Structures are given as C-alpha cells and as structure tokens.
Image (cartoon, helix red, strand yellow):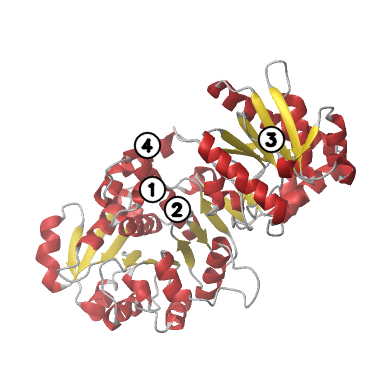
Amino acid sequence: MFQTPYPVEILTTAQMAKADSLTIADGVAGMSLMEKAADAVTRAANLILQNSSGRRVLVLCGPGNNGGDGYVAARLLRSPRIKVRVAALTRREQLRGDALAAAKAWDGPVEPAETVCFQGVDLVIDALFGAGLSRDIEGAAAELINRLNKWRRESGQNVVAIDMPSGIDGSTGAVRGVAVEADATVTFFRLKSGHLLLPGRVHCGQLSCAHIGIRSRVLEDISPNTFLNAPGYWRDQIPFPRIAGHKYTRGHAVVVSGDPSHTGAARLAAAGALRAGAGLVTLASPPAAMAINASALTSVMVREADEAAGLAALLSDARLNSVALGPGLGVGAATRAQVKAALSPAPNRRSFVLDADALTSFQPEPESLWRLIATAPGPVVLTPHAGEFARLFGGRDQPPAGAPLSKLERARAAARESGAILLYKGPDTVVAAPDGRATILAEASPWLATAGSGDTLTGIIAGLLAQGMEPLAAASSGAWMHARAAAIFGPGLIADDIAATLPAVWRELSAVPA
C-alpha cells in the first residue's frame, strides 16, 4: 500500500521562518527546536554509519542557526565509538542567539572550515547554510563546497545536509553559485519547494522531514498554497465506483484523432482515459482514419468527425463531458479550428485537456487561445512540456530584471495569464491553478522518458475530468497516477504499458484511507 511520505503542505523559506517565529512566540524555546532538529539529523547519520561501519564524522558549521544545528548534532553524535570533528566558517564569538549557545555547548576543538582536511572521514554533515540562503556562495565557502563535492565523488562516502544542501535556494531549487551534493537531507516540519524543484531535488539525495515540535496549527496563519502532489492531497476526491453507479454516471470522454498516419497518439490517450475510470470513451476520427482506428480498438468507441464542423456536430451531444485534443492532430490552422469548435460556448458544462499540437498550433498568437479558454463551457487543462511551454509563454513569464523565476513561479504566472490549469511537465511536474494554488510532484520515474507517455497522461486527466473531479485535483492526481504506473512497471516501459498498469495504481489507491 502506498503512503504519502511527507505532509502535504509545502512552504517557502519565508513561510518556514514564520512557522519558527510563531512557535517561539507560543512559548517553545528556540534551543528546544534546535535540539530536536539536531536529534533528527543524528538519527539519520547513525543509520548511515551503521550501514557503512563508519566511525569518523566531520561537521561543517556555518554562521547561522543551520550551523547551530550542526554544533548540537556534533555533541549528540560524539561517543566512544564515533569520533566527531567540527570545522566552522565563522569564529564562535561572531555567532548570535541560539547558534552561539549551541557553539558554546560544544567543548571540542573547532577547525577552520576553509582549510579542513577530509582525509579519513566516513561521513560529512553539511550545516553551512540552510534553506534561507539569500545570496550566491562565493570565495572561501564556494571553494570548501567544491572540495567537499570532489571528496564525496572520489571517496564514495556520504554527505548529510541539514535542512537544505548548502547553496540550494530553498524556495526555487536553484543553485546559488555552487551547491553541496548530498546523499541525504533532513528537513523539518514541512518540505520547502526547493527540495522538490530541479536541480535542488537532485542535490538533496534521500529526503526526510522530521517533526521538531512546531504545531500544525501555525499553518492557519501561514495559509500555504503549494502542496505535495501525492494521495494525501487529493485522495478524498478520487472518483471510486459506487455500487449504485453505472457507466453513464462515470462520464463520457472524447479524444480527437489525427490523420491516418498519426492515429497512435490519440489511441494512447483514449486508453488512458478509459483506464482512468471514464465510463465511456469515444475516439473522434477523421473519415480517412476510421478503418485504422476501428481495427485497433475494442473497448473504445470510434465515431466519425470530419475536421472542425464534424467535431462540433459530435459535441452537440451533451453527454460527452470531457474532450482531449492535441496528440497527433498536426500543427496549423485545422487544429486551431478544432480547438475553437470544442471550446465554443455551450449550454452544458464540459472539461477539456489541450496538449501537444493543440498547444503548438497557437504559438503565433497564444492570446487567441486565452480568449477561447475565457469563454469555454468548463475548465481547461494545458499540459505543456518545456518546449511547448516556451512556445506559448516565451519570456513573458520572466521578470524584466533579477533572478529567473522558478518553475513553480513560471507555472503560476502561465496559469494566471491563460486562465487554465497549467500542468508543466518534467521530472518535477508542477500543476498550477489561476487562483495561485499549485502542486509539485515528488516522485517521478525516469522510465517515463519514452514516446507517447505524454499522450497517455492527457487521456488519464481527461478520464478523471469526465468523472467530475475538480480540475486541479484531476490534473495533479493524473500526473501522480501516470508516474506511479511507470514506477510499478519499471524497466522496459513503453507508453502502452502505462494505461495497462493503471489497475495496479487503482488497487494501491483503494487501500489508502481517505
């Protein structure tokens, strides 16, 4: 049975700082938080040392509370069996507050971090800079991190980062100059977006989130609007079949096919929609492709729809409540016309998923697509990969000056501009709504890097929308189910296997309490 590995709320570094301050204002001592954080780090370090039979630990301490956590971890780790050294970037007399108190409680020697030697070390704890890093790392600190990374690669030994690998921006996941390559990262209370967005996610290694005494009620004041894309966020909205239900109550999805030489993508999407639970799925096919599609499909119905007029006639049936367009349609005016026909105002509510060619066809004038979305008879989900995103949004989502926006910020900006749910695909898939809510996928599978996998995702989302699922939840859960199916199947995955593995994903979800 799959269990959500972390709490669902994801915080920015500013929100985490507020959680700390609210907790301290509520009477919890800052040193208590530091002691519990260091204890969690110590447990992670001990586990690695036990597995590797290591005994020699080096703790690298920085100038702030992250360094304070390091001093406490050094004190807790030291024992007759484990030898601990501490090296610091900042002299003890330059520290303040809890970090100073933690440093004073360490009664061992402190070496200068700039010249510390890694020879003979079995494990390094990175307590240099935490998630709140606000500038690029340069000079002696950058040289130290480069030496640490080189030692790790050459020795094969492990690095445990406290809160965030030093040099990773906690809110964006960006590398600020240079960053520690950790094997494990221990963070506290809630994940930060920088833990999940690339490249931060890669630098974190094995990620864990420890409870250190910050109560969940502080979230009421923080009001986070970013969430972990995992069952803990959307499981209670999953449309499981009901005893009194039947196929007509589970929605009817339509997938629009391309010409005779480009039919496979639409069939993959149709299979995804059916396996996602839609009661009925119809493939809208050009007349010339009818025989090809009909001979390749059994559970999916095939209906003739000749270009935009034919699609409009088909969609006059109000029972068809979800439409997927784009896979294999071709780029150009004909596809734009079909999208316009599908999104035209109608008396009955209907949901839409636009992917691939349905997106690229609007590259010359994306604003015309936004206008169609504004008057569509229901929610629209856009599912671009990085190339399609660049074609639609270009540089308009970037600030005129300063640091580039993170993937999360770009997805939010694109959702606001387009008026659609924006699923920005990739190993760190982000789903954003125009109202600012967003999810980040924590567990993607590298086996999804295969032709047709995105077409199947389009169908899965269309199938969930057909069943009446809220669009942000449908897009998020669709992305998760897509990735989970790939993880279950594993090596050798091709796009056809994704839909075929969805029953195993449904079995896992049915075992997770709502």
Label 4 Cα crowd, 10 Å radius (few <14 / some 14-19 / many 20+): few
- Mark nearer the N terminus (3 vs 4): 3
Q: Is residue 103 left or right of residue 48?
A: right
Going by the numbered disc 3, the residue's amino acid type is His
Q: Nearer the viewer, mark 2 or mark 3?
A: 2
| Distance (Cα) linking label 4 and label 1 | 23 Å
Circle 3 is placed at which residue position?
Answer: 211
Between 25 and 508, the residue placed more toward the observer is 25
Q: Position of residue 248 (x, y in %)?
A: 31, 54
- Mark nearer the N terminus (4 vs 1): 1
Going by the numbered disc 4, the residue's amino acid type is Arg
Q: Position of residue 364 (x, y in %)?
A: 39, 84
Query: Decide: marks 1, 2 in contact (CB < 8 A)?
Result: yes
Circle 1 is placed at which residue position?
Answer: 446
| Distance (Cα) linking label 2 and label 3 | 27 Å
User: Element under label 1?
Assistant: helix
